[in-house]
Amino acid sequence: MTYTDISNKEAEELLIIAGKSSLRSIEKLAGGWANSNYLLSINDGTQLVLKIWNERTPKEVEKIVSLTCWLAEHNIPTPTPLTLGNSNKTIIKNGLTWMLLPYIDADWLGYDYDSLFSLGRTQAMLHAVEAPEGIMEDFSMGFKFFHQLFEVANNKDNWSPFLLQLKEEATLLSELIPTDLPKGIIHGDLFPDNVLGRDGEVIAILDFEESCKNYLALDIAMTFVGFGWSDGEPITERWQAIIAGYESIRKLNESERNALPHLHRYATLSIAAWRYWQFVMNIPNTEYSDRYVEMISRLDKNLPF
């Protein structure tokens, strides 16, 4: 987890390009595994977020920005970058993409019924937006990612118990998940640290880095992975709130409902695989090394669907 340090001068230079007032203070923001985020307070009384993409190429960021702008144009609540001059929304410094975003004064979304109903409804609104041309179709934490991990294990001749389990699970799930489920834009990572809320309503959805055109029901299952559990147990009431909000906009068909247990297992393993890659293979020997185990422990629990 690399965090890019910046100086006040560098922040000032970006504000000048954006035609904004001068910098009053700068504060490093917590959160984010792959980006560096700073809260900029400027002398006109407003606040902005300076975001530096540490693990995405400029071309990848360009596609993400294009998608978020598309979604914002279609009334999905998500912040879009400020224009920095010559109609550009980003600049490249030392090979990394920098941007300015509006600061949203809101808390993380709650787990009460109204908040989760709003989350489900907002997700259905997202799913109703037509996918733009060129959007990626492969889920970045899915089967292709699993096979990349398997290739590393083969090359190093180092198959851990988790990777052996993942390989077995992936083979089974690829047969169980129907290939004709409805597809559309999915967020792919709708976890609590990606949703801002206030007074029981979603205010903003953040970080569309895993977004792609894929199974809509997979996205709902992933949302339950993120929001539906407490102390290692699935919470039925949370699922009821999410799906009620979702189906107030879009009804699941029978195939989607039947596939939910398999999709939830797939989503759970996707998060486990990402955590294993990040904290065991990529950045080992940290306090997060066992984070993937939390997901594995959920696999044999009874689900509310």
Image (cartoon, helix red, strand yellow):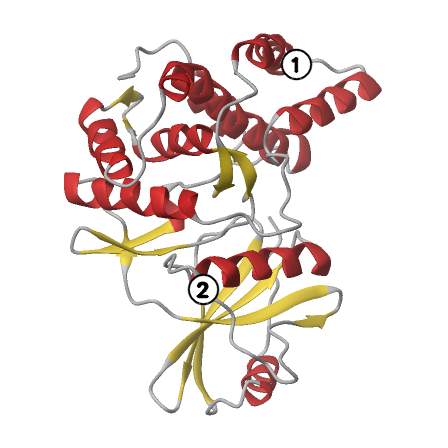
Place of residue 198 in the rendered image (x, y in percent of width and height, measured from the top left): 21, 57
| 90 with respect to 258 (left or right) | right
Q: Is residue 298 visible?
A: no
Q: Residue at x 52, y 15 (%)?
A: 177
CA neighbours of label 1 inside 10 A, class few (<14), some (14 to 19), many (20+): few
C-alpha distance separating marks 2 and 1: 45 Å
Q: Which one is in front, 215 or 266?
A: 215
CA neighbours of label 2 inside 10 A, class few (<14), some (14 to 19), many (20+): few
| Foreground label between 2 and 1 | 2
**Rendered image quadrant of residue 74:** bottom left
Q: Residue at x 63, y 24 (%)?
A: 143
Q: Residue at x 62, y 63 (%)?
A: 4
Q: Which one is in front, 76 or 49?
A: 76
Q: Which one is in front, 161 or 303?
A: 303
Question: What amino acid is at disc 1?
Answer: Ser
Q: Is residue 144 above or below residue 26?
A: above
Question: What amino acid is at disc 2?
Answer: Glu
Q: Residue at x 30, y 15 (%)?
A: 303
Mark with earlier residue (2, 1): 2
| 138 with respect to 240 (left or right) | right
The C terminus, quarter of image: top left
- Secondary structure beneath label 1: loop
**Rendered image quadrant of residue 136:** top right
Place of residue 93 in the rendered image (x, y in percent of width and height, measured from the top left): 71, 71
Place of residue 132 in the rendered image (x, y in percent of width and height, measured from the top left): 58, 52
Residue 73 is marked as: 2
Q: Is residue 143 visible?
A: yes
Residue 160 is marked as: 1
| 129 with respect to 283 (left or right) | left
Q: Which one is in front, 174 or 250?
A: 250
Place of residue 298 in the rendered image (x, y in percent of width and height, measured from the top left): 39, 17
